Amino acid sequence: MTIVRTLLLLSLFVTGPAWAETLSVPANDPAVAAERPTRGSTMSTVQGRYGEPVTRHATVGQPPITRWDYPRFSVYFENDRVLHAVIVK
């Protein structure tokens, strides 16, 4: 029993502190500052605000997912609502 306690106490001291990294993105980074559609916007709202997309990809899967490409970002829709808008570099 004392060996188990000794090993347990030893294991507590052997483990080091946890380390974590923080990712900082400068506020003046153009990728962060780029204006893009917000989640939940409709297709008609996106087209009205940003114009005709450069490319409209065919709908895929169920529920239907559609992608529109603009020069600075791509927009992913589920049915007619924005799921994500991804910056294109």
Image (tube, rainbow, N blue to C red):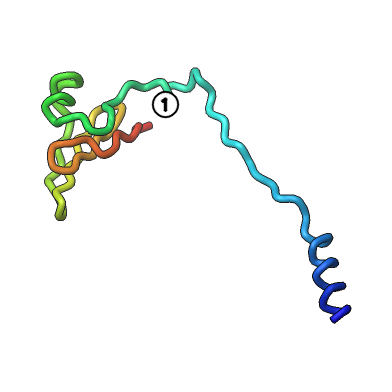
Label count reads 1
* Relative depth, front residue between 17 and 1: 1
Which of the 4 image quarters holds residue 23? top right
Q: Residue at x 26, y 27 (%)?
A: 37
Q: Quadrant of residue 73?
A: top left
- The amino acid sitting under disc 1 is Ala
Who is closer to the viewer here, 74 or 89? 74
Q: Position of residue 62 (x, y in %)?
A: 14, 54
**Residue at x-position 84% and y-position 73%:** 5
Residue occupying image coordinates x 84% and y 66%: 9
Residue 68 vs residue 2, the one in the foreground: 2
Residue that lies at the very extreme toward the bottom in this rendered image: 1
Q: How far across and how far down the image is residue 63, in percent?
A: 15, 51
Question: Where's the C terminus, which quadrant?
Answer: top left
Q: Callout 1 environment at 10 Å: few (<14), some (14 to 19), or many (20+)?
A: some
Residue 29 on image: x %, y %:
48, 22
Please determine whether, in this image, residue 11 is positioned above or below residue 2. above
Residue at label 1? Answer: 31
Say what secondary structure mark 1 lies in.
helix
Q: Please state, as top left, top right, bottom left or bottom right, where the N terminus lies in the image.
A: bottom right
* Horizontal relation, residue 37 to residue 19: left or right: left
Q: Residue 7, image x and y in percent?
A: 83, 73
Give the vertical position of 53 relative to 16 (above or below). above
Q: Is residue 83 shown left or right of residue 47?
A: right
Residue 76, quarter of picture: top left
